[in-house]
Amino acid sequence: MKFQTTITKSFKTDILVIGSGTAGATAAIAASHGKYKVTIVERYGFPGGSSTQMLDTFYGFFTPSNTPKKIIGGLPDLVVNELNKSGNIFLRPNTYGAGTGVNYNPEKLKEVWDKLLVSNDIQILYHSTLVGVESKGELSTCILFNKGIGFFSITAKRIIDASGDADYCHLADLAYEKAGEIEAAQSMTTTFRMANVNLAEFEAAGGKKMLKQKMGDAYVSGKHPLPRKEGSAHEMCQPKCISTVAVKVVDFDPLDPEGITKAEIEGRRQSFIFEDFFRAEIPWYQDSKIIGLSNQIGVRETRRVYGEYRLTKEDCMVAKQFKDQVFLCGAPIEDHRKSADGKSETYWQYVPDGGTYGVPYRTLVPKNSKNIWVAGRCFSATHDAHASCRSMAQTMSMGQAVGFAAVQSLDTDCEANNITINTLQDTLVELGAILEQPDKVADISRNGWRNNI
């Protein structure tokens, strides 16, 4: 048999976005505001990344304090507004210490992302995986694989790596830190959803407090071999359904084929241990069952690119502001770590006084690159800073910033690390982005989303 490597089809574009997760999809929408052709490629058959594969709540829009403030705006608002039009969101105040979450229907969100990409004339290529990179001057040629046509190429003037795993940067030999090499990598999580839960009576009887107690008891007694003492289970837009962040998988490398395979198997195994626990130990769950697992196990960190600047824990904890900041974050460090006894727990550390820190544009520009940006969980940050600044409102904001930066770079024929930052900031603010912490306390009622743009 012969291994076929012939390029079967070739495309040209101005701005190529690798990955259509929250960062990539938002980057493509932002870039489409210019006069250039924008192409986005995605290895799955739908957009959204973690927002549609495994999660159902946006965090990071609000500061997690007793006086929460809304700190994210612009295109991320547009996404939520589209969900809100069809009644597919509600707000969950101060959930599990992470602040107010914007709960949504992830299946509807797939259609919303599709609609926004298509309506902005973005070329979309699903089921396409990046496998090779070649750069010549201003142009980069990416080799991708689709099982229908085999290998094909896309040549672009500007690249936005929103792959999550920094796939483009890895193939282009740009510097990065691999999670686990310096500090322990965060654990992985398979999320699952259960139907037929009597939520009204469960909440009336103590809800989260009862669940926490029951999980702790089961963990200590060993009656149910749970991987941790605490985890979340919250209501969904769908009536009588809950979604979880409870499974914890450690000690596997998500970038190794054997490691990720074992992690997927372990995540599914733990999910059904949790199903048994819920049905046996939590009143009003006895008739519930799992109706779906995440499309893949949730991976929190792999490769983190070394950028023109690296966000640090100290930056976060002193609420540092930067002259080139392009969005804000007030989220705590939420580090899903492996504990001393081999189990996995969560370490929390909050920005003091309900404050926010700025995230500089330089964290989105790989060091020694000219026409490349990163957005999403592969941006330039240390382990601890990454554990704070990885919420989806922030990853959408990264995409928003780099999308407009790519347009400005083409407009002015300048390199990624040499754009006029004031012009980028003005563009973001005009669209509704928030670059300075507001004074006004946000409306956090259940149906309090009032941020149409």
Image (cartoon, grey):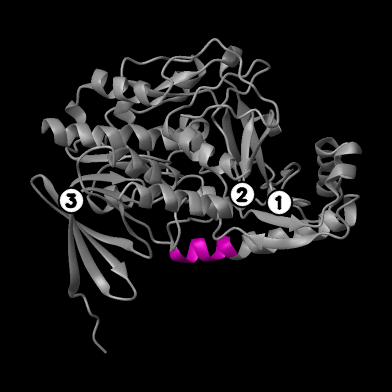
Q: Nearer the viewer, residue 225 or 52?
A: 52
Among the two numbered marks 1 and 3 on one chain, the one whose residue lies closer to the N terminus: 3
Residue drawn at 90 percent across, 43 percent down: 201
Residue drawn at 58 percent across, 39 percent down: 84
SS for dot 2:
loop
Q: Residue furthest top?
A: 439
Residue 251 visible somewhere in the drawing? no
Relative vertical location of residue 94 with respect to residue 146 in this rendering, above or below: above
Could you say which quadrant of the image residue 9 lies in? bottom left
The quarter of the image holding the N terminus is bottom left
Q: What is the number of callouts on the image? A: 3
Query: Where is mark 1, residue-wise?
Result: 238
Query: Where is mark 2, residue-wise?
Result: 105
Residue drawn at 74 percent across, 41 percent down: 230
Q: Nearer the viewer, mark 1 or mark 3?
A: 1
Residue 280 visible somewhere in the drawing? yes
At label 3, which amino acid type do we have?
A: Ala
Residue bounds of the magenta highlight: 257-264
Relative vertical location of residue 32 with respect to residue 452 in this rendering, above or below: below
SS for dot 1:
loop
Q: Nearer the viewer, residue 135 or 159?
A: 159
